[in-house]
Image (cartoon, rainbow, N blue to C red):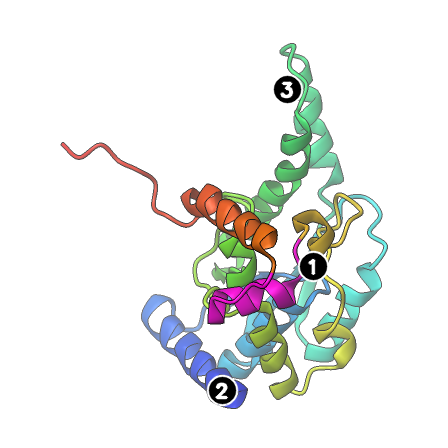
Amino acid sequence: MFNAIKVKNDIIQWIRNYFDENGKNCNAVIGISGGKDSTVAAALCVEAISYDRVVGILMPYGEQHDIDTAQEVIDTLGIKHYLVNIKQCVDTLAESINTVELTLSKQAIINTPARIRMTTLYAVAATIDGRVVNTCNLSEDWVGYATKYGDNAGDFSPLARLTVTEIKAIGNALGLPSKFVDKIPEDGLTGLTDEENLGISYDVLDKYIREGICDDPTMKNKIDTLHKQGLHKLKPMPCFEF
């Protein structure tokens, strides 16, 4: 029953309203990975505020095997862009931490580039009078598959209440090429796809989120456990109330 065209139009108007209230004539600054989330979010911003106010930032860590896809997204949408390679920054930070007799954990090695990327987006936004687009989706947020103060940060989030399945439908409604909408998502850091990292297929996850149906009790328990563990990433920072 998902009406992709209606939701697409509603999001476009919502983005317009956001900029009217939070920065008339400001730019939308968005990290472009070549995946569906950033592509759909960028396309929605183009429809909402025009291509000349959307700025894409490509942020490879050294060599990125699918950087050409990210460039294709830029070319397809016709938006201005900058390429900022984050490898030197990430490596220098790791070396600096190592000098204090600490070695970054595996989780820190995975999460740090995401946080450096968000720092990069805010640095660009502060330079060109921009607002940072958050590109998270409901499916990944539901099971905590986001980096706190990394990819789950931003100034406004057009896709955070939509599942992967729904975002694909919106991408099709926007007329985006299938190679962007249906591209197998991966984090670009671990060498694994998102579904391999999660151990859950998006089809199963989305059906459970929207319909509460999961035929595999083990998988249902895994989703529920990950959801509970990841809730802290979605809630405001706890504060002592004085």
Q: Quadrant of residue 66?
A: bottom right
- The answer to whether the residue labelled 1 contacts the one labelled 3, judged by CB atoms less than 8 Å apart, is no
The amino acid sitting under disc 1 is Tyr
For label 3, the SS is: helix
- Residue that badge 2 annotates: 1
- Residue beneath label 3, please? 97
Quarter-of-image position of residue 31: bottom right
Which secondary structure is most common in the magenta stretch? helix
Residue 52 percent location from the top left of the image? 59, 76
Instruction: Look at the numbered discs 3 and 2 and tell me whether their residues touch, using CB distance below 8 Å.
Output: no
Q: Is residue 79 visible?
A: yes
Residue, x 55% and y 46% (percent of image)? 150
Asked whether 115 or 191 is in front, the reply is 191
Of tags 1 and 3, which is closer to the observer? 3
Mark 1, Cα crowd under 10 Å, few <14 / some 14-19 / many 20+, is few
Question: Pointers 2 and 1 in contact (CB under 8 A)?
Answer: no
Q: Quadrant of the C terminus?
A: top left
Identify the mark nearer the N-term, 2 or 1.
2
Three-letter amino acid code at the position of disc 2: Met
Using residue 197 as the reference point, say whether residue 50 is left or right of it. Answer: left
Classify 84 as above or below 171: above
In the rendered view, would you say 189 is above or below 80?
above
Residue type pointed to by label 3 = Ile
Q: CA distance from mark 3 to mark 2?
A: 51 Å
Q: Which residue is mark 1?
A: 82
The span picked out in magenta is 200-215
